[in-house]
Image (cartoon, rainbow, N blue to C red):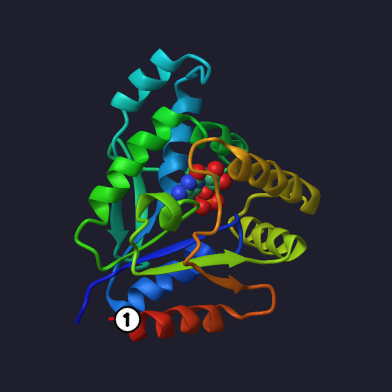
Amino acid sequence: MKKIVIAVDGYSACGKSSTAKEVASRLGYIYIDTGAMYRAVTLFFIQNYINLTNPKNVEKALDQIHISFKCNPATGTNETYLNGLNVEKEIRRMDVSMKVSEVSALAKVRKAMVEQQRKLGKNKAVVMDGRDIGSFVFPDAELKIFMTADFDVRAERRQRELLEKGEMITFDEVKKNLQHRDAIDTTRSESPLKKADDAYVIDTTKLTMEEQIDQIVRLAEKII
Ligand code: C5P
């Protein structure tokens, strides 16, 4: 069977991560959440008061960051580790979400993360989700998906997800955060969020999770 790279890009809160994770599990592929990598860098920058406007500080900080993923046997899913510590919960906090797009827009940060992502995907059999996977990290990915959904649906889904995790947050706060991230992610100069020309668009507004997963698995099965 042929091993491929599946790139899943799109806006925040379209259901990319949950969909990509399940697609990977059905195909027996590795799942890499690249948003988690940028979030882990952001957490380190917050914890260490790194000044984003000072390129030397940013570079020095990046040298001290080691990000890895380990499977949690209880849930069967990959969790994010920053310098050996499990930070899966911390990286989803609102203070990280508020800063992550500024951090991700920095050229040095992107260069370091893209290098790791290319290493993680070099043996293929991987589903990687993010913003620039099909357009920049793996421009030759055999299958590229671009996910979208109506803005209010995205905000409702994200608020529900955060409330379930015990983070008390209003609908307005979630909407502001998504607007803020969309604006920076789509306009930054370094590999902005955009659909690759050869990506399939999946609008998840009216789809169930099962339908989204099925669509991608079917597309993958035509190739592998
Ligand atoms: O996927 P998630 O919403 O957790 O990503 C958090 C942030 O990380 C995004 O809003 C974006 O700023 C950044 N990101 C990125 N490139 C990627 C993945 C995420 O710039 N490939």
Look at the picture and state if 178 lies above or below 8. above
In the image, residue 198 lies at what x, y percent?
47, 67
Label 1 lies in ligand 1 vicinity (Cβ under 8 Å): no
Q: Is residue 135 above or below residue 114?
A: below
Examine the image and state in which quarter residue 27 appears: bottom left
Quarter of the N terminus within the rendering: bottom left
Q: Nearer the viewer, residue 182 or 19?
A: 182
Residue 2 falls left or right of residue 34: left
Q: Is residue 173 placed above or below 51 in the rendered structure?
A: below
**Residue drawn at x 26%, y 57% as measured from the top left:** 121
Residue 180 picture quarter: top right
Label 1 Cα crowd, 10 Å radius (few <14 / some 14-19 / many 20+): few
Say if residue 131 shows up in the picture.
yes
Q: Residue at x 45, y 41 (%)?
A: 38
- Per the image, the residue denoted by label 1 is 223
> Seen from this angle, which residue lies furthest front?
197
Instruction: Determine the residue positioned at 48% across, 71% down.
Output: 19
Q: At 62% from the left edge and 40% from the top edge, which residue is drawn?
A: 187
Residue 209: x %, y % from top left: 56, 78
**In terms of secondary structure, where does tag 1 sit?**
helix
